[in-house]
Amino acid sequence: MKLSAKGRYAIKAMINIALNTSKEPKTLLQIAKHQGISLSYLEQLFALLRKNNLVSGIRGPGGGYKLSDEPDNITIAQIINAINSDKIRKEPVERKDEVIWSKFNAKLCNYLETVTLGSLISENNSASMPESAQTDVIVEDVMINGGI
């Protein structure tokens, strides 16, 4: 599992969709503006998220993206694995530092499989805070402080 800016943007986008209180799907343009990243970069991320059945696209006017499942059923590990699914896995090197890193990675994966979008949103949802600030607070909590 690789924690990267790419994974962080994917998690933020998924949280942004999950926080959407309207029944209308979110467009990639809305998400790109909110996150301050290019639309083409976000399209690449959503191609991977869609391929891994984490989001579903709605075509046409009023189209956009919705979560494929309830936020409580989508884990952070699923999002990161979907984004990294295009990476070729290397054969593990049996050096001591690689073995230690591999064990740490396994523990991190196990932990992130227990953290869902729903749990992040419910733990950090504040009615007085705008949606854009909520997304940033949630992702910072997970990525820096270890989350819940």
Image (cartoon, rainbow, N blue to C red):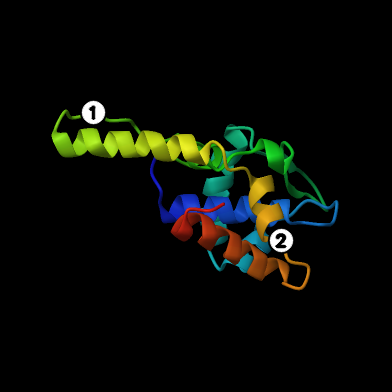
Residue found 73% across the figure and 56% down from its top: 19
- Return the residue at label 1: 92
Nearest the viewer among 44 and 49 is 49
Q: Is residue 121 left or right of residue 110?
A: right
Please rate how many residues cluster around mark 2, counting C-alpha atoms within 10 Å: few if below 14, some from 14 to 19, many from 20: some
Vertically, is 17 above or below 47? Answer: below
Gap between marks 1 and 2 measured at Cα: 40 Å
Is residue 56 visible in the rendered image? The answer is no
Which residue is pictured at 58% across the width and 33% down the height? 51
Helix, strand or loop at label 1? It is loop
Dot label at residue 125:
2
- Residue 105 to residue 35: above or below: above
**Quarter residue 72 falls in:** top right
How far across and how far down the image is residue 85, in percent? 45, 34
84 left or right, relative to 115: left
Instruction: Give left or right: position of 117 versus 76.
Output: right
